[in-house]
Amino acid sequence: MFSIRGLWFFCVATLVLAAPMAAQAVVVSTAQELLTAVDQANSGGDTEIVLMDGTYTLDRMLWVEADNLVVRGQSGERDSVVIEGHGMQGDVTHIFNVAGDNIVVRDLTMGRVSQHAFQTQPSAQSPRLVNLRIIDTGEQMVKIAYNPDQPGQHTDNGALEYCILEYTAGIGPQYYIGGIDCHAGHNWVVRNNVFAGIRSPDDQIAEHAVHFWSGARNTLVEGNLIINCDRGIGFGLGDRPHHGGIIRNNMIYHAALQGNGDVGISLESAQGAQVYNNTVILEHGYPHAIEYRFPATQGVLIANNLCNKAVMVRDGATGTVGNNIEHASPAWFVNPSGANLHLASAVPEAVDQGRTIDGLVEDYDGDRRPLGAGPDVGADEYAH
């Protein structure tokens, strides 16, 4: 079995040094002190809240109206600070519900709530979530909301980086769950995260580990590991579009005996999206690794992806597709059952066989591309 905490790139996150406290900072050690500090920040109080190691069990959500608020664990070790509700069936719906701009939450664990661990209101701008462990939510873990009656209002310029989003039981409580679910947001970055166990316990599949839709645009999704999630990465859904954006250098794995399974990467009404140099290995019965569908999906690029299943066009989509592998063997990878999809050797069909793409300068690990005559196919650039 894989060990989420043992994954190599989270060494970067766990070595984050605790930032110096701002001039306006308060240190808290109890749930009531945390609630009071957030209330005071909303009224113009301290702009940084630093949590000492421990568990903070809330009796109500943290409603944030303040701009430029930082909430962080003091030690920088995300497992040492836990903010929790009363469980996925409990009466606490959120950890953070945010209406202010430029909030930063980092270096802690949060979850065990009935709806979302982190939600933004449509007026909120530029949230940043870094080095978090987000666990056990009754609905989507990170929810970026919008109001369809006010289409010009949406949360833009957000970031989710170096986080783990997981169900600790390896399966969720229902189908209406997901990792990060963003409506209408522009210019988001989802980078170097792990998503694990976002699975439905019944016949309806769960929502995506990463999903941007309802008019979202220019999303960058790169360097993520998605393990045993019903659906991987989605831009758009049905007739609710996504515009532009890049999905690259992600590794997606789903074991055969892990319940429902759907496509690894999906473009639906996703104009101008680019999907390149991902590795998608699905051992369940769904026949496609990557899909692009519907007439509104135009001008897409799908290239250099290393898969064990088909890249499939559906329902009138159009785009440029090439240099993909659709028959990858488990023997090509270091440990596929452990979700380690690095190349185990210089596989001739993959190494140096990719096309050159503007912006493709590194791989899943941050190693330079290309290392040989051309970029390798897939998320990993094999070290010759």
Image (cartoon, rainbow, N blue to C red):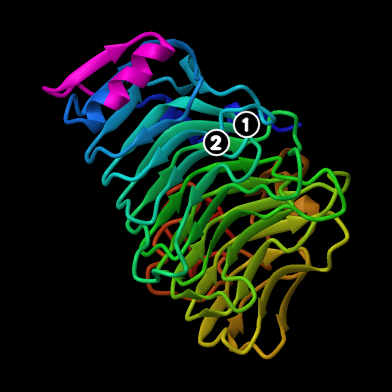
Q: Position of residue 47 (x, y in %)?
A: 20, 29
Q: Is residue 25 magenta?
A: yes
Q: Which mark is residue 164?
A: 2
Q: Is residue 237 left or right of residue 125?
A: right
Splitting the image into 4 quarters, where does residue 45 fall?
top left
Seen at 61% across and 28% down, the residue is 91
Residue toward you, 336 or 120:
120
Compared to residue 189, the image places residue 243 above or below, namely below
Q: Position of residue 151 (x, y in %)?
A: 40, 71
Residue toward you, 4 or 181:
181
Mark earlier in primary sequence (1, 2): 1
Splitting the image into 4 quarters, where does residue 23 fall?
top left
Instruction: Please state the extent of the stretch shown in magenta in the rendering.
Output: 17-39
Q: Is residue 235 left or right of residue 254?
A: left
Which callout, 1 or 2, points to the residue nearer the camera? Answer: 2
Q: Which mark is residue 305?
A: none
- Mark 1, other Cα within 10 Å: few <14 / some 14–19 / many ≥20: some
Residues under labels 1 and 2: Cα distance?
8 Å
Q: Which residue is mark 1?
A: 4
Q: Is residue 20 left or right of residue 247?
A: left
Q: Position of residue 126 (x, y in %)?
A: 30, 51
Picture mark count: 2
Q: Amino acid at mark 1?
A: Ile
SS under mark 1 = helix
